[in-house]
Amino acid sequence: SARLTVPQFVARKSEGKKLSVLTAYDYPTARLVDEAGIDAILVGDTLSMVVQGHDSTIPVTLDEMIYHAKMVTRAVSQALVIVDMPFPSNLLGVHEAIRNAGRILKETGAQAVKLEGGADQAEVISGLVNAGIPVMAHIGLRPQLVHQMGGYKVQRDHERLMTDAQAASDAGAFSIVLECIPQEYAAEITKLIPIPTIGIGAGKSCDGQVLVLHDMLGLTSGHVPRFVKQYAHIRESITDAVRQYCEEVQSGDFPGPEHSFR
Ligand code: KIV
Ligand code: NA
């Protein structure tokens, strides 16, 4: 296959060509997203909420992330594949982080990992990078800190954001997700650091954007955050199709002769 490589992903910043990233968690969706021309697919720990139905990203396990990442890599021939390190797989020291990230690369065929953290994870980031494991950092809103934050809010601590971005970059991260921060701060970070910034709720100045696939397709039930643009309304399509099927089974219109054997 000719998947986009980490160095090619990074080079897009100096080429001034924006990066588009979406999540995917299984074979059929990863295949559609890849064939439509996405630059990178993130097997996000939003798997926990979007697919498993939990109310935070805390419950999903490393084994479950690996199980889903394998489905995704089987489908992908063009995109860079990045897998989230689930809580607390990157928080038990450099040694344990290398073991866990090593499993992700070894068992799934993904090319990189993402972890939540900036200055606090600098040692882990450089340890992984020294082990040959490309790392995408993730600062601003960090959903794995939900219990500490008591909810999901825009992150406005300018000094902390700048420190985290610089530390992640200095530690050797190849890229960084900026989640839910003022667009002016994202613009400043994007100018400051040499690696691509990938925004979600961080405005248009980032080097790229990422969204949760099910959110942008209109497949998520319940609250959808302000930063999501819904490009389709798949829930309605699915509901309509299922309703029609139920009706036609009742009425006997399905199956027709063209669906039957004699
Ligand atoms: O888990 C996830 O889907 C993410 C993206 C929203 C950045 O971390
Ligand atoms: Na995540």
Image (spheres, rainbow, N blue to C red):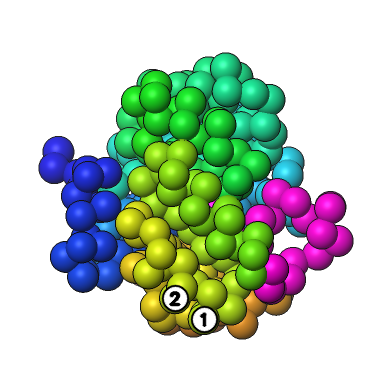
Please tell me whether residue 129 is drawn above or below residue 157 in the rendered image: above
The front one of 154 and 67 is 154
Q: Is residue 88 left or right of residue 209?
A: right
Residue 173 is one of the magenta-drawn residues: no
Which residue is at a point 53% across and 18% down the rendered structure image?
99
Q: Is residue 247 left or right of residue 24?
A: right
Q: CA distance from mark 2 to mark 1?
A: 5 Å
Q: Which mark is residue 184?
A: 1
- The answer to the question of whether label 2 and label 1 lie on touching residues, with beta carbons closer than 8 A, is yes
Q: Amino acid type of disc 1?
A: Glu
Few, some or many residues within 10 Å of mark 2 (<14, 14–19, 20+): some
Q: Please provide the residue range marked out in magenta.
A: 137-157
Residue 72, x across and y down, in percent: 38, 43
Q: Which secondary structure, mark 2?
A: helix
Which residue is at a point 50% across and 35% down the rendered structure image?
125
The front one of 234 and 193 is 193
Which residue is at a point 44% across and 76% down the rendered structure image?
187
Residue highlighted by disc 2: 187
Residue 156 is one of the magenta-drawn residues: yes
Q: Which secondary structure, mark 1?
A: helix
Q: Is residue 7 visible?
A: yes
Residue 155, x across and y down, in percent: 68, 69
